Image (spheres, grey):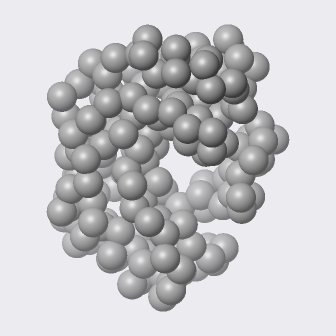
Amino acid sequence: MPIEPAHSSFQQIINDLARRYYAPVFEPHVTIHVGEDNADAATQALTDAARKCTSIRLTPVGIDQSDEFIKILFVQFALSAELRRLNEIIRYAAHDSLQYELKPHLSLLYKNLAAATRRELAASIKVPFSEVTFDVIKAVRCVSATQSRADVEAWRVVAAASLFG
């Protein structure tokens, strides 16, 4: 989860887009890992990661869009060594063999839209930060694969930890 002022700025964009397109409201976040639904393993993984990692700084490279529901409109970030390490710690601690491809992004909207609308939105949004710091990690139980507003609204946090290192 991003720290202030980025958290509020991204939340405002998410809220505005959700209102305009009747889409779900959600917390701004970067997905680090997708794994099995195991709350105990998730809690242990977050505890291990919080002990071993400090806050993560990511550099936005732009706003992008796709036809994939979970990446309709998003801020793309450059992959950092710190984020890669955090992902590896969580995967190892969770005993997870699934191969989630880490492409750090922060979604701004979950809603199926026409390509022209997505492109217009991507061109109209500017990231007001040259760097964004993230200092809280959360394990979220979600429908796999998330494909609808109801799926997003069903997400539930099962564990959380602050990154102190």
Residue 21 drawn above or below residue 108: above
Camera-side residue of 57 and 21? 21
Which residue ends up furthest to the right in the rendered image? 150
Q: Quadrant of the C terminus?
A: bottom left
Residue closer to the observer: 40 or 25: 25
Q: Position of residue 83 (x, y in %)?
A: 27, 60
* Residue at 46% across, 21% down: 122
Q: How many tags in the picture? A: 0
Q: Is residue 123 visible?
A: yes
Toward the front, the furthest residue is 116
**Horizontal arrangement in the rendering, residue 71 relative to residue 45 (left or right):** right
Position of residue 158 in the picture relative to residue 29 (left or right): right
Side (left or right) of 84 relative to 119: left
Q: Quadrant of residue 2?
A: top left
Residue 26 on image: x %, y %:
60, 35
Q: Position of residue 56 (x, y in %)?
A: 23, 51
Q: Residue at x 59, y 30 (%)?
A: 109
Residue at horizontal 27%, vertical 35%? 60
Please identify the quadrant where the N terminus is shown. top left
Residue 136 point in image, percent of width and height: 37, 50
Residue shown at the point (63%, 39%) measured from the top left: 67
Q: Is residue 28 visible?
A: no
